Image (tube, rainbow, N blue to C red):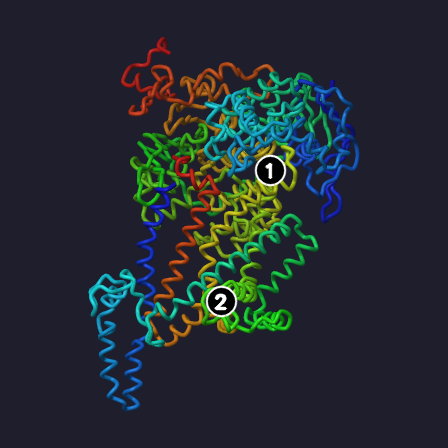
Amino acid sequence: MNVLSIENLTVEFRTAEGPVRAVKDVSFAVPQRKTVALVGESGSGKTVISQTIMGLLPTNAAVTGGRVLLCDPRDGSAPIDIAALDRKGPQMRHLRGNRVAIIFQEPMTSLSPLHTIGDQIGEAAQLHRNVGAAEARELTVEMLRLVQFPDPASAVDAYPFELSGGLRQRAMIAMAMICKPALLIADEPTTALDVTIQAEILKLIKDVQSELEMSVLMITHDFGVVANMADDVVVIYHGEIMEQGTAPQLFGNPQHPYLKALLNAVPGFHMDKDERLQPIRPIILPAEALTGNRVDCTVKPGQPLVKVTGARKEFSLRKGGLFSSHSRSILALDDINLTIRRGECLGLVGESGSGKTTVARAILRAIELDSGTVAYDRGEGLQDICSLDKPALMDFRRRVQLIFQDPFSSLNPRMTVNDILTEPLQIHRIGTPEEQAERARTLMRLVGLDPRFLRRYPHSFSGGQRQRIGIARALALNPEFLLCDEPTSALDVSVQAQILNLLQDLKRDLNLTYLFVSHNLAVVDYIADRIAVMCRGRVVEVGETRQVVANPLHPYTKALLSAVPEPDLNAPLDFEALNRSRASDPTAWPEPYRLCPQDRPLLVEMEPDHFVCAPALHGKQYAPSAA
Amino acid sequence: MLEYIVRRIITMIPTLFVISFLIFFIVELPSGDYISNQIAALRSSGEASAVAKLEFLRAEFALDRPFFERYLIWVGLWSGPHGFDGLLQGNWGWSFEFNKPVEAVIGPTLPLTVILNFATILFVYIVSFPIGIYSATRQYSWGDYGFTFLGYIGLATPNFLLGLILLYFFNRWFGLSIGGLMDPQYLDQGWSLDKLLSILGHLIVPTIVIGTAGTAAMIRRLRANLLDELHRQYVTTGRAKGLKESTLLVKYPLRMALNPFISDIGNLIPSLVSGSVIVSVVLNLPTVGPVLLSALQSQDQFLSGFILLFVAMLTLVGMLVSDLLLAILDPRIRLGGKASG
């Protein structure tokens, strides 16, 4: 039986330029107790479909054709056509949150910060299950237990800001589940989360699904998630269904060129070193434009360009006010040693909060280290960047540039793209205004954007285009060293492939050096020559990418690798193993990797050029039988 | 929570001292003082006999001492001609212009000022709240445009003009006496129900006049805040739960949009006092505004200094109240320190 059947659905938006069809003649069904994945890029109409099912379409959108039939297996009544209901009427409100529930992408913003999670979860029960406040509270505790909250009885009274992202997403799931809906819509439920937490949440959705005998419509752009969750797959592009079928059919024998292209755009561990991702809309790189006003980099390829030695940083959190000064501190960096060689890409991997970004900021001299040094070779040997005087620092800034994670907040909304791209040149007083304008045009072409867009403001670009503007800004000064802080984590796979290829081409043609910070091991595997894995402010493993990925030695690296969902039906996530290992707690690692708070995180060379943090082995010769 | 309140009150003390010093410094910035100006005036007109008396008065009020000593004597931390006798000891100072203690000059006006301010704040909130919500939830409707238009008129009309027009019509229609805060016959009487009613009746015009600009600004602010909040993800979450639109609005976005409202309480007070001076003069209201104006003009320094300090005090109390209300309403402020720790 199909819980949800969508028949020839068409949704139109009224805009200033006339009606726009966001969904065109879409038909698919979600069978009972099955998971259907709706896959597509951003802007493909996935979310509009989910809004239609929930009756949450914005006021300027209207269903102009087709039916959305919801058939509730619980009471066996006749199917209801949701598309025909009044969106604000009592009938729709009765279904919403009761028979159809939804989880959103962003757990940070989808809960009200002013109400306890117990209040927000129990509200749905009070609305639909005819229970009083006390009973709703009990049901909430029960639900929190179901979604594996630690200590559910006291978590009821927690506010969302007291919880981590993973826990908030669990709370969202509990809220969606409390009325035991027939259909759960999960709109990119794990995109904003770390890989390890993503795996936990996916497992949770699976568990709850079998417990409550519910159907799931999973909206995602991540084929790794699809391969692990979906029974059926529906591929959508520009509001039209390109291909649909069971997961084995689509992964085993993709027919439509769009699906093939999407699959080719996903980086995976199985790829060869010189294999390239195939973006759907590739960018051709005119490289000659980038060698013009470069500062000379005389460091030979392979020689150390950046050297971080014994870096340590504590952040103190002030608690209370003026007269109470008990402060707590968090160790963000603990004795970090890293070397980045000219012309290589060092991937820095770890969960959020592991200190990756702090390292990048320390290298930029954006924060002061408590102890340790960052040395940079400007052609005169390695120099401590803290000792640089003003002109030398300006020169350093010209050589080192940063690409940010969030393409939405890293561009000033009140500056045109032209202003954004020429500002670095103005700061460093490079070229006449005409040359700067010419440079801005070159940069736009370089990142595959039309130079005519220069007069626009950032808001008129998509996420991927904005990220390319961010990259163009970073390239404006022709730097030799680029810090990329999760440059693709906010982007679709297809755009991600574009950006990754762009970065690789730039590196090849310009001999750039990268520090590539990311939590996605597959991405780092694709782009990095060497990988450094960080956990709780410590580097736990460093080595050649191939070596680290093929033969991870540290338990944390192993856990990270096993949590990456592969877009391959034959390599499913081992959910059971994930649940058992508490991989991000240094004191729980097995010997010889165990780290107590007072231990120095010493690295041991276990294989040639492959270092692992194992204090217990320090000073001893590595014996293969011990591992 | 109690610890927090106590701590907040303790931190107000150094703030008050800094403010009092700044006030004293600024009030004394013009060269000379009330008495030396008088002496100069008498000298030029040749009446030297009165000068001796004024010289005596200068010494009596310690105006011949150095600046810091004068300040400390005013506050009551330095031994003046009469020992420790300053603000801390409850002596509000002497008004040269009225030749009375400051207490006697502004004593009767203070409660009326407070009443008027309070009524105005209430008016601002009561009127702007429903209109702001209406405008935000029905953005770009005729009603929204209408209120926006009215709001701009409210912002743009000179207050005193509006005051005069309203007074005229209230007098024509309801027979309300022009000016003042009560009918003239109650001026010297003790408190009675009739007097209270008369005051309430006379409060209407000044409250509307002083409040319109603030109301218009507040409507704009609430509308903008609420519009921001209405498109937040958590509102969609609430709607996806099946909440009714009205319940949803009150429980989630409105609650979030309240914060700037509350934190504004402290800011409103000084602007109401200083903004209402002209209105008070025009409508002949017995509030401290006109007194402050004349005291500043005639360098009646103890009087103006005390009024300014009083307004600063009111502001601090307003800030305290808004901080406490915020802490009660917003768990992020109440528990924020703990959560990040």
In the foreground, A197 or B195? B195
Mark linked to residue B276: 2
What amino acid is found at the position of numbered circle 2 in the picture?
Answer: Ser
Q: Residue furthest top?
A: A625
Q: Which quarter of the figure has residue B123? A: bottom right
Determine which residue is flagged by label 1.
Answer: A284
Vertical relation: A486 (above or below) B165? above
Q: Residues within 10 Å of mark 1 (few under 14, many from 20)?
A: few
User: In what element is the residue under mark 2?
Assistant: loop
Residue A574 drawn at (x, y percent): 53, 15
Q: Is residue B116 above or below residue A416?
A: below
- Relative to A618, is A465 on the left or the right? right
In this view, the mark in front (2 or 1) = 2
Q: Give me the chain letter of mark 2.
A: B
The crowd level at tag 2 (other Cα within 10 Å; few <14, some 14-19, many 20+) is: many
Identified by mark 1, the residue type is Ile
